[in-house]
Image (cartoon, rainbow, N blue to C red):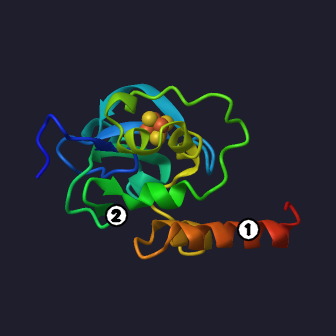
Amino acid sequence: MDSEDTMTWCPSGRADAAESVVLGVHATPGQLTYLAAPIPARDALSLVPEDISPTRVLRFASHCVSGCGNREGSHCTLMDRVAALPAQADSASVPRCHLRPNCQWWRQSGVEACHRCPQVVTTVTVDDDLGNLVSNPRTTPEEVAVAVGSAATESGTD
Ligand code: SF4
Protein backbone atom coordinates (compact mmCIF):
# COMPACT_ATOMS: atom_id res chain seq x y z
CA MET A 1 0.00 0.00 0.00
CA ASP A 2 1.31 3.42 -0.94
CA SER A 3 1.40 6.14 1.68
CA GLU A 4 0.04 9.59 0.94
CA ASP A 5 3.67 10.78 0.75
CA THR A 6 4.60 8.41 -2.06
CA MET A 7 1.22 8.19 -3.79
CA THR A 8 1.26 9.08 -7.47
CA TRP A 9 -1.73 9.51 -9.75
CA CYS A 10 -2.64 7.62 -12.89
CA PRO A 11 -3.53 9.92 -15.82
CA SER A 12 -5.69 7.21 -17.37
CA GLY A 13 -7.43 6.25 -14.20
CA ARG A 14 -10.76 5.16 -12.84
CA ALA A 15 -13.89 7.25 -12.85
CA ASP A 16 -15.36 5.63 -9.77
CA ALA A 17 -12.65 5.86 -7.12
CA ALA A 18 -13.34 8.13 -4.18
CA GLU A 19 -10.52 10.47 -5.18
CA SER A 20 -11.18 10.42 -8.97
CA VAL A 21 -11.01 13.72 -10.80
CA VAL A 22 -11.48 14.75 -14.43
CA LEU A 23 -8.15 15.21 -16.22
CA GLY A 24 -9.56 16.31 -19.56
CA VAL A 25 -12.18 16.04 -22.27
CA HIS A 26 -11.90 14.12 -25.53
CA ALA A 27 -13.09 16.99 -27.69
CA THR A 28 -12.04 15.09 -30.83
CA PRO A 29 -11.02 11.42 -31.16
CA GLY A 30 -7.42 10.87 -30.17
CA GLN A 31 -7.05 14.31 -28.62
CA LEU A 32 -7.51 15.51 -25.08
CA THR A 33 -8.33 19.00 -23.89
CA TYR A 34 -6.85 19.22 -20.40
CA LEU A 35 -8.71 20.97 -17.61
CA ALA A 36 -6.87 23.79 -15.89
CA ALA A 37 -8.06 22.55 -12.51
CA PRO A 38 -9.39 19.19 -11.36
CA ILE A 39 -13.13 18.59 -11.12
CA PRO A 40 -14.37 15.76 -8.90
CA ALA A 41 -15.39 12.86 -11.11
CA ARG A 42 -18.70 12.47 -9.29
CA ASP A 43 -19.68 15.99 -10.38
CA ALA A 44 -18.91 15.28 -14.04
CA LEU A 45 -20.39 11.79 -14.24
CA SER A 46 -23.92 13.07 -13.80
CA LEU A 47 -23.50 15.17 -16.96
CA VAL A 48 -22.59 12.23 -19.22
CA PRO A 49 -25.58 10.65 -20.99
CA GLU A 50 -26.41 7.17 -19.71
CA ASP A 51 -25.74 5.49 -23.05
CA ILE A 52 -22.18 6.82 -23.27
CA SER A 53 -19.30 5.30 -21.35
CA PRO A 54 -17.76 8.19 -19.35
CA THR A 55 -14.22 7.11 -20.25
CA ARG A 56 -15.04 7.50 -23.96
CA VAL A 57 -15.55 11.24 -23.57
CA LEU A 58 -13.53 12.07 -20.46
CA ARG A 59 -10.18 11.08 -19.01
CA PHE A 60 -10.02 10.59 -15.29
CA ALA A 61 -7.13 10.56 -12.88
CA SER A 62 -7.07 8.40 -9.80
CA HIS A 63 -4.49 6.97 -7.47
CA CYS A 64 -1.83 4.69 -8.98
CA VAL A 65 -2.49 1.58 -6.94
CA SER A 66 -0.37 -1.49 -6.31
CA GLY A 67 -3.18 -3.81 -7.40
CA CYS A 68 -3.28 -2.42 -10.93
CA GLY A 69 -2.49 -4.98 -13.63
CA ASN A 70 -0.13 -2.51 -15.28
CA ARG A 71 2.05 -2.04 -12.23
CA GLU A 72 5.31 -3.81 -11.52
CA GLY A 73 6.65 -2.61 -8.20
CA SER A 74 6.39 1.16 -8.42
CA HIS A 75 6.66 1.08 -12.22
CA CYS A 76 3.78 1.56 -14.70
CA THR A 77 4.21 -0.82 -17.65
CA LEU A 78 1.36 0.89 -19.51
CA MET A 79 3.59 3.96 -19.74
CA ASP A 80 6.31 1.81 -21.28
CA ARG A 81 3.90 0.70 -24.00
CA VAL A 82 2.52 4.20 -24.52
CA ALA A 83 6.12 5.41 -24.92
CA ALA A 84 6.46 3.09 -27.93
CA LEU A 85 3.76 5.10 -29.75
CA PRO A 86 4.79 8.01 -31.96
CA ALA A 87 4.90 11.37 -30.23
CA GLN A 88 2.23 13.89 -31.12
CA ALA A 89 3.09 15.88 -34.24
CA ASP A 90 2.97 19.08 -32.21
CA SER A 91 5.36 18.08 -29.45
CA ALA A 92 7.36 21.27 -29.04
CA SER A 93 5.72 21.82 -25.68
CA VAL A 94 3.92 19.75 -23.10
CA PRO A 95 0.20 20.05 -22.36
CA ARG A 96 -0.83 22.30 -19.51
CA CYS A 97 -2.31 19.85 -17.07
CA HIS A 98 -3.15 20.00 -13.41
CA LEU A 99 -1.85 16.52 -12.64
CA ARG A 100 1.86 16.97 -13.40
CA PRO A 101 3.17 17.37 -9.82
CA ASN A 102 1.75 13.97 -8.90
CA CYS A 103 1.55 12.20 -12.25
CA GLN A 104 3.03 8.70 -12.33
CA TRP A 105 3.79 8.90 -16.05
CA TRP A 106 5.54 12.26 -15.71
CA ARG A 107 7.69 11.01 -12.85
CA GLN A 108 8.53 7.90 -14.83
CA SER A 109 9.09 9.25 -18.34
CA GLY A 110 8.98 13.06 -18.21
CA VAL A 111 8.18 14.89 -21.44
CA GLU A 112 8.13 11.63 -23.40
CA ALA A 113 4.97 10.77 -21.50
CA CYS A 114 3.37 14.17 -22.06
CA HIS A 115 4.05 14.05 -25.80
CA ARG A 116 1.96 10.90 -26.02
CA CYS A 117 -0.57 11.45 -23.24
CA PRO A 118 -3.25 13.32 -25.28
CA GLN A 119 -3.82 10.39 -27.65
CA VAL A 120 -4.44 7.86 -24.87
CA VAL A 121 -8.02 6.65 -24.50
CA THR A 122 -8.79 4.76 -21.30
CA THR A 123 -11.51 2.59 -22.86
CA VAL A 124 -10.55 1.35 -26.30
CA THR A 125 -13.10 0.05 -28.81
CA VAL A 126 -12.98 -3.57 -29.99
CA ASP A 127 -11.94 -2.50 -33.49
CA ASP A 128 -8.99 -0.44 -32.23
CA ASP A 129 -6.25 -3.02 -32.73
CA LEU A 130 -3.37 -0.80 -31.67
CA GLY A 131 -5.26 0.53 -28.66
CA ASN A 132 -6.04 -2.98 -27.51
CA LEU A 133 -2.43 -4.01 -27.97
CA VAL A 134 -1.17 -1.06 -25.92
CA SER A 135 -3.70 -1.57 -23.14
CA ASN A 136 -2.88 -5.26 -22.72
CA PRO A 137 -0.45 -5.73 -19.79
CA ARG A 138 1.01 -8.81 -21.52
CA THR A 139 2.13 -6.75 -24.54
CA THR A 140 5.76 -5.65 -24.61
CA PRO A 141 6.87 -2.18 -25.78
CA GLU A 142 8.76 -3.92 -28.58
CA GLU A 143 5.52 -5.47 -29.84
CA VAL A 144 3.87 -2.05 -29.85
CA ALA A 145 6.81 -0.62 -31.82
CA VAL A 146 6.51 -3.40 -34.41
CA ALA A 147 2.77 -2.80 -34.75
CA VAL A 148 3.32 0.94 -35.18
CA GLY A 149 5.97 0.27 -37.84
CA SER A 150 3.71 -2.13 -39.69
CA ALA A 151 0.82 0.33 -39.64
CA ALA A 152 3.07 3.09 -40.97
CA THR A 153 4.32 0.85 -43.79
CA GLU A 154 0.78 -0.15 -44.76
CA SER A 155 -0.37 3.47 -44.83
CA GLY A 156 2.72 4.59 -46.72
CA THR A 157 3.76 7.07 -44.05
CA ASP A 158 7.04 5.37 -43.27
S1 SF4 B 1 1.64 12.44 -18.76
FE1 SF4 B 1 2.08 14.65 -18.77
S2 SF4 B 1 0.29 15.59 -19.78
FE2 SF4 B 1 -0.31 13.50 -19.17
S3 SF4 B 1 -1.27 13.79 -17.15
FE3 SF4 B 1 0.89 13.28 -16.79
S4 SF4 B 1 1.93 15.26 -16.61
FE4 SF4 B 1 -0.08 15.65 -17.54
Query: In this picture, is 17 found above or below 135?
Result: above
Query: In this picture, is 89 found above or below 132?
Result: above
| Circle 2 Cα neighbour tier, 10 Å, few/some/many (<14 / 14–19 / ≥20) | some
At label 2, the amino acid type is Asn
- x and y, in percent, of residue 66 in the image: 20, 58
- x and y, in percent, of residue 26 in the image: 54, 44
> Total label count?
2
Residue at 31% across, 34% down: 102
- Mark 1 or mark 2: which comes first in sequence? 2
Would you say 82 lies left or right of 85 here? left
Could you say which disc has been placed on residue 70 in the image? Answer: 2
- x and y, in percent, of residue 114 in the image: 53, 39
Of 156 and 121, nearer the camera is 156
At label 1, the amino acid type is Gly
Q: Secondary structure at mark 2?
A: loop
Query: In this picture, is 63 found above or below 143?
Result: above
User: Toward which corner of the image does residue 126 lie, by quadrant?
Assistant: bottom right
User: Toward which corner of the image does residue 7 lie, by quadrant?
Assistant: top left
Q: Quadrant of the C terminus?
A: bottom right
Residue 54 visible, this orientation? yes
Q: Could you tell me how far apart the alpha carbons at marks 1 and 2 are, in whole angstroms?
A: 24 Å
**Labelled pair 1, 2 in contact (Cβ < 8 Å):** no
Would you say 61 lies left or right of 140 here? left
Would you say 31 lies left or right of 73 here? right
Could you say which disc has been placed on residue 149 in the image? Answer: 1
Of 109 and 94, nearer the camera is 109
- x and y, in percent, of residue 41 in the image: 29, 40
Could you say which disc has been placed on residue 16 in the image? Answer: none
